[in-house]
Image (cartoon, grey):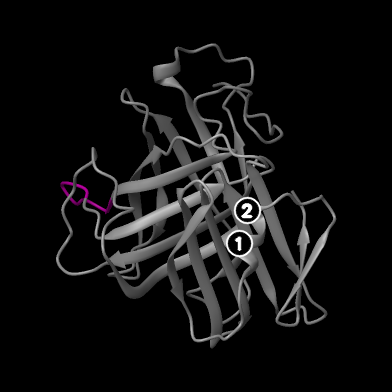
Amino acid sequence: MASEHPIQIPVLQGHALSITPSITERRGAKFGDAKSMTEPSSVLAVYSTAGYYVDIRVAKAGDQNILDLATSNLNAPLSDDLEWAFAGKVEVRLPDQQDTKAIAQAHARARWNRIIDSQLSYLPDETDEADLTLQPDGSILEAGGFPNPTTGEEEPFQEIWYLIPQLPLTGNCVVLKADHQDIHVRGLIVRVGQWCQGILYRSKDDKVVERWHLEAPGNWIRDLRIGESTVSLPCTNTFAHLEIGGTIELDGITWVVVE
């Protein structure tokens, strides 16, 4: 058996499973012994070069639980039902850094460290792991074990993810992290190319998530905002030139440019 060597992010420069930086869309998922995948949600995860990520999952409006791997769900009408939003940092490692397998057999293991989780009434410091396998069409199959949201029981799961091509924008990757004297306040915003997502946690009853995309040059559109909080997220600030270490003050919260 090949040994597993922890490696720095990204996995390998130009490697097919180097998911940092990237814009990834889930287009199908299943738990347990389900015969086929479905996709009732609009699921987007953005990963920075250093591995910071924000993953937002929102139920589609109406009865749209139809699997079509060739079609993106990012333009689908959305409900106000936030299924899950979480953020943190990801690490990816290969079974063997010296492995020279054909690209179609590429395989890696990812570890997501969650520091913000919309489903929890407390601040997490938790880790999820799953295997990543490159598929013939260039998509990535994620497989692991996780509590089934329907049964609450730990079950094997599979998700299929597609990489969204990045537009070559100035300052293509930007990360803002909330810096607040209250240790219970956590926030992370990640923009990669034409997509930006952010989440802010202030208390179990005060959370907000936003998703933005570039509709046309200079025209950024907010696709969703969910949360009762009146606090704004400085997502639009990531569209301009920012310096590492710089700060943004907004609604009493300091955001630091960490990438």
Counting from the top left corner in percent of width and height, residue 239 is at 62, 53
Residue tagged by mark 2?
239
Q: Which amino acid, mark 1? A: Thr
Q: Is residue 125 visible?
A: no
Query: Helix, strand or loop at disc 1?
Result: helix
Mark 1 Cα-neighbour bin, 10 Å: few <14, some 14–19, many ≥20: few
Residue tagged by mark 1?
236
Query: Helix, strand or loop at disc 2?
Result: helix
Q: Quadrant of the rendered structure where residue 179 is?
A: bottom right
Task: Report whether 149 appears left or right of 117.
Answer: left
Q: Considering the image in quadrants, where does the N terminus appear?
A: top right
Q: Nearer the viewer, residue 248 or 36?
A: 248
Q: Which amino acid, mark 2? A: Phe
Magenta residues, dominant SS class: loop
In 3D space, how far apart are the residues under numbered discs 1 and 2 (Cα atoms)? 6 Å
Instruction: Examine the rendered structure and indicate whether residue 110 appears above or below residue 101.
Output: below
Are the two marked residues, 1 and 2, in contact with CB atoms closer than 8 angstroms?
yes
Looking at the rendering, the stretch of residues picked out in magenta corresponds to: 29-37
Counting from the top left corner in percent of width and height, residue 160 is at 33, 42
